[in-house]
Image (spheres, grey):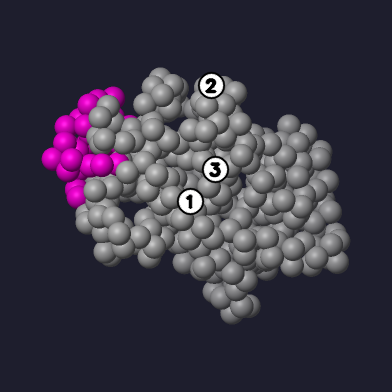
Amino acid sequence: MIGIDARLTYYRTGGISTYIVRLIKALERLDFEHPYVVLHSRKARETLVTRFQRADLWTPCHHRLERVALSVELARFRLALLHSPDFIPPLRGARRHVITVHDLNFLFYPQYLTADSLRYYNGQINTAVEQADHIFADSEATKRDLITMLNVPAEKITVHLLGVDEAFQPQPPAEIARVRAALTLPPAYLLYVGTFEPRKNIAGLIEAYAQLPVDAPPLVLAGNRGWLFEETMQQITRLNLGDRVLWREKIPQADLPGLYSGASALITPSFYEGFGLPALEAMACGTVPIVSDRGSLPEVVGDVGLQVNPDDTAAIAQAINHALSDSVWRDQQRAAGLRRAATFQWEATARTVLSVYQALL
């Protein structure tokens, strides 16, 4: 039996949780040969499976005794293979262990993580990659980081680019208007989607936005609060941006396609991303991406939109100005983004994952 650890989806949304949910759904459509058990938190009311078996576990994510406690809970399943999509596997949960390493931002930028996150990831990542029989990476950039920073053999790593859900596509004017009304947004706006935390470089984005003309569309920051949120709020006050920066938290999943579709541009100036789903989702909705030139983001957008140095706020501001002022270029990029986004499919991700499972069993 193959086990997939999906407990994180109870505690967090977006990012790794999105990866877990979409991968399970795609595997359910593809694999009718192997039995699966999907491991949920016992607190989770919603189920991620329709065909696979579900098991509810007591061990919470990121607990200091997680690796030991999870090993004990998993013993009854006698798993042939366990996939740990949140980096860190239990001490021994199956005959074979597969992990997904989405990024190594905690090694590159430890100053942008909480003490608990540093303890969890930095303190265990070396053991995790050594223990794993195979490792998935979301991008070639993350694969290179694994090789150079953790000395992982290249043949132990398989890159699988992520997919984009079919719900993300250009929305009709009526749907865009509905989402704007629901979120109290103006007719035109710039957009950031993601967690409000330091490594996302929201401070740099706000500094860049402050350099734009006062008649520039408002900047909408959509996502969930991370740590050091109050410092960002103080920055907005210091720059006298007032109601030019709009916070929108806990956006319903169903509203995201309309939110992307109504934006003049999506700006993702992160210092580091293991993949960058918002940039892909924005392209799928016909929205121009402006992204950092670091990490995996260049792999996601290719030659669509603009890439900027995240440390250069003037360059970020210049890129935003270009996207706002050149309508011909913007239309060309929208079309190019739709073509590129169509090449990212969760089924392709799942097929790559399944091929590794089969090789290890």
Element on which disc 2 rests: loop
Q: Nearer the viewer, residue 360 or 109?
A: 360
Residue drawn at the location 44% of the way across and 39% of the way down:
100
Residue extending farthest to the left is 76
* The magenta stretch spans residue 271: no
Contact between labelled residues 2 and 1, with CB atoms less than 8 Å apart = no
The reply, left or right, for residue 318 in relation to residue 248 is: right
Q: Can you say whether 165 is above or below 35 in the image?
A: below
Looking at the image, tell me whether mark 3 or mark 2 is earlier in sequence order: 2
Q: Can you say whether 119 is above or below 47 in the image?
A: above
- Name the residue carrying label 2: 151
In 3D space, how far apart are the residues under numbered discs 1 and 2 (Cα atoms)?
23 Å
The reply, left or right, for residue 197 in relation to residue 271 is: left
Element on which disc 1 rests: helix
- Name the residue carrying label 3: 159
Question: Which quadrant is home to the C terminus?
Answer: top left
In 3D space, how far apart are the residues under numbered discs 3 and 2 (Cα atoms)?
16 Å
Assess disc 1: are there few (<14), some (14-19) or many (≥20) residues with their C-alpha within 10 Å of its C-alpha.
some
Assess disc 2: are there few (<14), some (14-19) or many (≥20) residues with their C-alpha within 10 Å of its C-alpha.
few
Q: Position of residue 190 (x, y in %)?
A: 68, 56
Q: Amino acid at mark 3?
A: Val
Residue drawn at the location 58% of the way across and 64% of the way down:
259
In 3D space, how far apart are the residues under numbered discs 1 and 3 (Cα atoms)?
8 Å
Q: Can you say whether 173 is above or below 236 in the image?
A: below
Q: Can you say whether 216 is above or below 262 in the image?
A: above
Residue drawn at the location 30% of the way across and 59% of the way down:
33
Magenta-colored span? 55-81
- Name the residue carrying label 1: 352
